[in-house]
Every structure is written in structure tokens, then in C-alpha cells.
Image: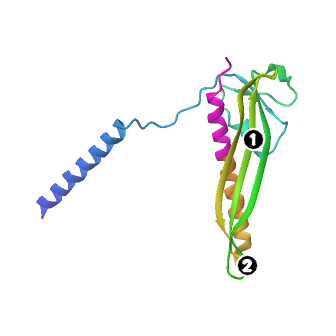
Amino acid sequence: MQRRRVIALLYRSALAGFGALGLSACGFKLRGAQNYAFQTLAVLPQPGGALAQELRRSFDSSVRVLASGEALTQAQMVLDIVQEQREKSVVGVNSSGQVREFQLRVRVKFSVRTPQGKELAPAAEVLLQRDISFNETAVLAKEAEEALLYRDMQTDAVQQVLRRLAMVRLD
């Protein structure tokens, strides 16, 4: 009995070792901090929606986001949030026509330019969507879940915009 336990322990240890070796060999690496080609950024419009405000707070100490009173010419790069939109559409109904499922979307359109107007990256769009079931007996709970999903999609959209900004070069 004791021998089986020792063999099982050795077998598990070998599997764990091979798993760790496999992960290190595949090139897996945690995403580190972003490196931006600019030190100052203006985010327009001022103050903007919830996404623009979260975007301003998301930059680390290496990037200074200009406040509303500062001159736009001080920025090395300008991020224009052209559109920030939340959408909700019905995707499922039951046999009596009652809504059973919604699709939530967050759409963000933005462009990156210099203060002089030179386009640094073409206009881009980030579109995120989530499905949510609906039950008329739990309306308050579903409203809270919807708000949580919108907040999660907004954070995800901000992270995608930050990654795209890290790819922009000032050349």
C-alpha cells in the first residue's frame, strides 16, 4: 500500500514538472507594463464620458494626462474619443413574446493625432458585447447584473485602447 502512494506521488511530481517545462518552453509570458512613445497626452472631449474619465486614471506615472485648463499644444499626442455608446438589444423571446435574453454592447470610436492635426493612427473602434438572460421576477437583480457587465466592458475597452496607444509611434 505504501509503495503505491510513493509511486503515485512520483507520478504526480513528474507530471507537474513536465507541465511547468511545457509552459516555459511555449513562450508564455505575463503582460508587463506598457511602454508609450509619449510623455504627455490630452484626452478629448473634456471631461468626456465615464470611459474617458477611467482612461485618464489608467495611465501610470510615465505619462502625464493634461487637465482641462492646460493648453492642448503642450501634449505630444491627442486622443479623441469620437463616440462612446452603450447599446441594449433583444436577442431572445419565449413563445408568448416575453423577453428572455438581451445583448449588451459597448462601442468606442477613437482617433489619435498630434496637436497640430497630423493623424498618428487611423480611426479605430472597440466593440464589446455580452449576453444576459432576463427574468421579470428578478428585475432588480438583473439591473444590477447589467450595470456590472457594462462596468466590466468599459474597463476592458479602456485596456484595449491603452494597448493600442502603446503601439502608436510619434515618428
Q: Is residue 79 above or below residue 88?
A: above
Residue depicted at 73% across the width and 78% down the height: 97
For mark 2, does the 10 Å Cα neighbourhood hold few (<14), some (14 to 19), or many (20 or more) residues? few
Please give left or right for residue 58 compared with residue 21 in the image. Answer: right
Q: 153 or 64, which lies in front?
A: 153
Of 52 and 122, the residue lying toward us? 122
Specify start and end residues of the magenta stretch as a single range: 156-171
- How crowded pointer 1 is (Cα within 10 Å; few <14, some 14-19, many 20+) is rated as some
Tell me the element at label 1. strand
Viewer-closest of 3 and 159: 159
Tell me if 12 is positioned left or right of 66 in this view: left
Q: Amino acid at mark 1?
A: Lys
Provide the residue designation for mark 2: 97
Q: Secondary structure at mark 2?
A: loop
Alpha carbon separation for disc pair 1 and 2: 34 Å
Question: Disc 1 designates what residue?
Answer: 109
Amino acid type indicated by mark 2 = Gly
The dominant secondary structure in magenta is helix
Q: Is residue 9 above or below residue 41?
A: below
